Image (cartoon, rainbow, N blue to C red):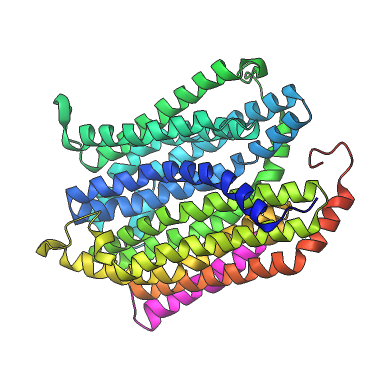
Amino acid sequence: MTLPVREEFKSLTAIALPLVLAQLAHVGMGFVDTLMVGRLGPEPLAGIALGALLFFFFQIVALGVLAAVTPLVAQAFGSRDMGGAARAARQGLWLATALGLPGFVLLRSSSAVLLAMGQEPAVVAQSAAYLDAVAWGFWPALLFGALRSFFEGVGDTRPIMTIMAFGVVLNVVANDALMFGRWGLPALGLAGTGYATTLVFVLMTVAVVGFLRWRHSRFRVLAGLRRPDLATLRELLRVGWPLSLSRAFETGLFAATGLLMGLFGQAQLAGHQIAIQSASMAFMVPLGISIATSVRVGHAVGRSDAAGVRRAGAIGIGLSAVTMAGTALLFWLAPRLVIGLYLDPGAAANAEVVRFAASFLAFAAAFQIFDGLQVSAAGALTGLKDTRVPMVLALVAYWLIGVPVAVLFAFVVGLEGRGLWLGLTIGLAAAAVLLLLRFGRGSLASVVAVLDRVSPADPIR
């Protein structure tokens, strides 16, 4: 039965709100790090700009693969196959280990690459101190991601919300202690931020294991961990790699922009970190809406409601655009208010950083709506299990359009950092247009194709 617009909106927002809070908690640690490192000065702020973008790029790519745990657990749980749900989560832990060890090595050996790319040696030294410390938290972060996906798959998300909120609070305390040497501990500066993040991920992983044993002991997820199940691992990789690559293409655009920004000096890099961190926080709202849109589109497919698919997708996309319009106005009309969260905009020593940050926030205001449109359209397509074509569209938008435009205007036209942000904006705009066209023109055909493939026993029913 087709739901009216008002009921669809209520259902979508009921799902979206806790997801938005979860995403805000997830990115909150990086936000806290940037705020607190700003108290150390422009050079450490530039250092974490490089270090954090590398750490979170590797993390996002790896978690993209591990996100496949969620649908595998959900389908098994829906068919009352408790063993299958446990097996998917268990092999997610194996996959997290397989991805965590090379990630650790890459993070701790990144200094030579950054220097070869022309980054300032003083900034690279700061970045290396952070990466050497935070690399120890990479594997625990992936273990937590795999078990988080299990909780999502069985529909039990409150423990994850509790743990992540605890993680944000703990990160503030650990940063203060290890960065500035509280309670008799050494003042480690930027390296202290990395060790604080590692500590938080370790304790979050311990906490999620505790909740797993307490609330879902009947699944016996942690039993039989001695050897991998190759068939389940292959299925995780088959489902996860398109989503991982899509995330890599988008995140890679932002990472490349940050690396290129370092070529224009410490002040532009620090200003970029302020603007990109602010935009990342705002992005968590449409990201939560995007996941909810995917759920609602999937529900409509399950009840063979083609009109409901279009309605759920349109409402989710529209809601994302409206919320991002609000943050766009904030960035455009009150940039100094935003900058003041990170450093004192009235201090003479910060004047150059503030000038660049305000300029970049103007571009961030322009791409807010495009960012909301592209992520919600991608969520609607995910609800149709349409992930491979969006992966190709992401490649085209970000790397065949966004990056060339950024390089052209930054280095050839001579706009430097502003040119890089222009490339970001155009790449996101291209992604929004391509994904909206894919959903708008192809959603009904996709529904028909999905329904034709679905058997009565398929969990989509």
Query: From where the camera sits, is residue 244 visible?
Result: no
Stretch of the chain drawn in magenta? 391-416
Q: How many marks?
A: 0
* The quarter of the displayed image where residue 190 is located: top left
- Residue 415 versus residue 202 in the image, above or below: below
Residue at horizontal 16 percent and vertical 32 percent from the top: 181
Residue at horizontal 63 percent and vertical 21 percent from the top: 221
Q: Position of residue 312 (x, y in %)?
A: 68, 56
Q: Nearer the viewer, residue 198 or 333?
A: 333
Query: Is residue 286 toward the left or the right of residue 194 in the image?
Result: right
In the image, residue 396 lies in the stretch drawn in magenta: yes
Residue furthest to the left in view is: 348
* The quarter of the displayed image where residue 249 is located: bottom right
Q: Nearer the viewer, residue 193 or 168?
A: 168
Q: Where's the C terminus, which quadrant?
A: top right
Q: Position of residue 170 (x, y in %)?
A: 32, 31
- Residue 62 versus residue 115 in the image, above or below: above
Q: Position of residue 316 (x, y in %)?
A: 61, 57
Query: From where the camera sits, is residue 10 visible?
Result: yes
Query: Is residue 414 toward the left or the right of residue 99 in the image?
Result: left
Query: Is residue 318 toward the left or the right of residue 188 in the image?
Result: right
Residue furthest to the bottom in view is: 413
Q: Position of residue 52 (x, y in %)?
A: 37, 49
Q: Nearer the viewer, residue 99 or 56?
A: 56
Q: Main secondary structure of the magenta part?
A: helix
Residue at horizontal 14 percent and vertical 25 percent from the top: 184
- Residue 291 versus residue 216 in the image, above or below: below
Residue at horizontal 42 percent and vertical 74 percent from the top: 422
In the image, residue 316 lies in the stretch drawn in magenta: no
